[in-house]
Image (cartoon, rainbow, N blue to C red):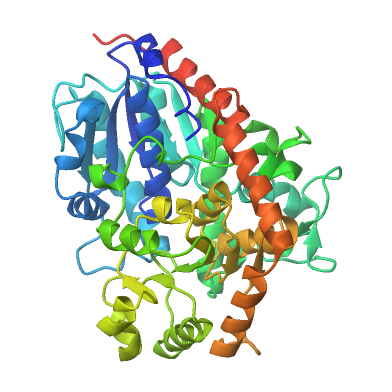
């Protein structure tokens, strides 16, 4: 990751009392980059209190095998804490509109107690001392009030693209310009394009990411929630971070204009596969236990660049018919494949795909969850069929893996536009007509086109090189992360 390039001796420059509290939004695509930030801070000598909702706290611990993941080396300075989210056990926590409303009421009093505590409560070693700095999710920017009242240095981290964040910050201007209405609905897009500022090139309508939820009431509420929290993050956090790098989104970072001027790129964040291995059970923030040995031993047995990796994230929903068409397309490709099917969904697949003979002949593996950082870094992987979540997109870019795009909602459509139209490192998966099933024939054709496209492979390799440069000791993202560390230590209050 950006900070990983620094030598371990630099940790001595951080006072032992440096103690960061991290609060991610309670979704898999947010918890993982926050855990990556946690490991960056631990490597630099910080103690870390990592705050999940109680629901996700239990999931992370179960996936990591209890507390063992925090007991090695400086990971003893990692404290895991769960807080109530205000929802009862029967409610759907994928209903983010409801979850946002309950968290804003339930979490602040618990956060106040953690900030005022002695650092001895939670899962992990005791005696970390009082919290001295805070990093919160932009989507949880209301939590910054507690830090500001205590004079604690703070940062807000945005776990998606800088472009979407810039659009949220510029929403009031878009309303004044008549591009969107007061509730974020598009009004005046010429050829589905708009300009965020006069000097910036046109942006595709998919960068108005909140409009891709399939429910207008939800889209309206999410628009108001995200724009208000984004503005609050800029107003209240000392530093605004984004998990991206400048060359990946040059339109955002080359103008130096508001609203993008406030955004500091520190990506691509990742738990470096060169420093650690999955066998050491490093805590990664996964909600499900990963099939490390099954995945990596399977990949080790496959030819270079031959494997189709399929994973649609933690939320995407598909019909039984669509899952079966994907299965038939993979079988027809005659290529080895590794397919992640979340717990409980494997029963929707054809029995032939799950038959032991399929695995015995090396054709494929179906697993409930995978160590994606290491899967995409494996030389056997030739392409990634993805829902286009920002974490997955960055992991593919960082490892030079072309993508077939199958977005589900919100900024996943933004990321598809980046992948297919701007970076040109992938292809869209599009049904013959709206709402129809994507056939096995379409899937097979797209796999063949992508895996034989040398131009795509060259472009994604170039982005991989740029990602590596940013993660190096002299890279821009690494320098920006160092700016964060300097601020968090220089501005650190005295414990009394």
Instruction: Depth check: give the residue in front, 388 or 118.
Output: 388
Instruction: Depth check: give the residue in front, 230 or 78.
Output: 78
Residue 126 higher or lower than 103, as above or below: above
Q: Does residue 449 appear anywhere in the picture? A: yes
The image position of residue 22, as x and y in percent, is 35, 35
Apparent side of residue 366 relative to residue 84 in the rendered image (left or right): right
Which quadrant of the figure has residue 183? bottom right
The image position of residue 465, as x and y in percent, is 63, 41
Residue drawn at x 14%, y 42% as measured from the top left: 67
Apparent side of residue 445 relative to residue 45 in the rendered image (left or right): right
Q: Quadrant of the C terminus?
A: top left
User: Could you tell me how many numbered marks the image carries?
Assistant: 0
Residue 86 higher or lower than 45, as above or below: below
Residue drawn at x 27%, y 27% as measured from the top left: 115
Instruction: Depth check: give the residue in front, 160 or 151.
Output: 160
Residue drawn at x 67%, y 66% as measured from the top left: 185
The image position of residue 396, as x and y in percent, is 54, 54
Q: Does residue 207 appear anywhere in the picture? A: no
Residue drawn at x 49%, y 56% as measured from the top left: 392
Instruction: Depth check: give the residue in front, 414 or 199.
Output: 414
The image position of residue 135, as x and y in percent, is 41, 32
Which quadrant of the figure has residue 276? top left
Apparent side of residue 109 relative to residue 331 in the rendered image (left or right): left
């Amino acid at each position: 990751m950006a900070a990983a390039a620094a030598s371990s001796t630099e940790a001595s420059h951080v006072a032992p009392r440096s103690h960061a509290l991290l609060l991610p939004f309670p979704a898999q695509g947010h918890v993982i980059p926050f855990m990556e930030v946690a490991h960056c801070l631990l490597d630099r000598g910080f103690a870390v209190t990592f705050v999940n909702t109680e629901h996700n706290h239990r999931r992370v611990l179960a996936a990591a095998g209890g507390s063992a993941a925090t007991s090695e080396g400086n990971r003893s300075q990692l404290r895991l804490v769960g807080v109530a989210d205000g929802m009862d056990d029967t409610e759907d926590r994928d209903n983010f509109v409801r979850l946002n409303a309950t968290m804003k009421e339930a979490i602040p009093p618990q956060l106040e107690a953690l900030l005022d505590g002695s650092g001895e409560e939670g899962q992990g070693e005791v005696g970390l001392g009082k919290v001295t700095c805070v990093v919160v999710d932009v989507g949880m920017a209301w939590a910054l009030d507690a830090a500001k009242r205590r004079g604690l240095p703070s940062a807000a981290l945005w776990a998606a693209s800088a472009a979407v964040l810039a659009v949220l910050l510029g929403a009031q201007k878009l309303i004044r310009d008549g591009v969107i209405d007061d509730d974020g609905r598009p009004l005046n897009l010429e050829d589905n394009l708009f300009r965020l500022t006069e000097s910036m090139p046109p942006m595709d309508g998919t960068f108005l990411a909140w409009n891709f939820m399939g429910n207008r009431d939800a889209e309206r509420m999410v628009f108001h929630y995200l724009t208000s929290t984004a503005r609050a993050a800029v107003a209240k956090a000392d530093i605004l971070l984004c998990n991206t790098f400048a060359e990946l989104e040059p339109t955002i970072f080359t103008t130096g204009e508001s609203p993008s001027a406030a955004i500091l790129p520190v990506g691509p964040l990742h738990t470096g596969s060169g420093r650690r291995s999955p066998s050491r059970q490093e805590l990664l923030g996964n909600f499900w236990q990963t099939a490390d040995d099954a995945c990596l031993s399977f990949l080790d047995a496959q030819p270079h660049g031959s494997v189709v990796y399929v994973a649609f994230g933690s939320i995407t929903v598909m019909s039984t018919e669509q899952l079966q068409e994907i299965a038939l397309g993979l079988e027809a490709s005659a290529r080895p494949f590794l397919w992640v099917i979340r717990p409980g969904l494997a029963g929707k697949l054809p029995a032939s795909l799950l038959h032991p003979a399929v695995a015995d002949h090396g054709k494929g593996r179906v697993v409930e969850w995978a160590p994606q950082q290491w899967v995409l870094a494996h030389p056997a992987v030739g392409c990634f069929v993805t829902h286009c979540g920002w974490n997955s997109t960055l992991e593919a870019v960082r490892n030079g893996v072309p993508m077939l795009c199958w977005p589900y909602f919100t900024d996943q459509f933004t990321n598809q536009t980046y992948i297919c139209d701007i970076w040109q490192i992938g292809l869209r998966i599009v049904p013959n007509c709206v709402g129809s099933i994507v056939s096995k024939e379409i899937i097979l054709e797209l796999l063949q086109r992508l895996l034989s496209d040398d131009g795509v492979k060259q472009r994604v390799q170039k982005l991989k090189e740029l990602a590596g440069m940013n993660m190096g000791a002299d890279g821009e993202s690494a320098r920006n992360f160092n700016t964060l560390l300097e601020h968090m230590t220089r501005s650190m209050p005295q414990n009394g």
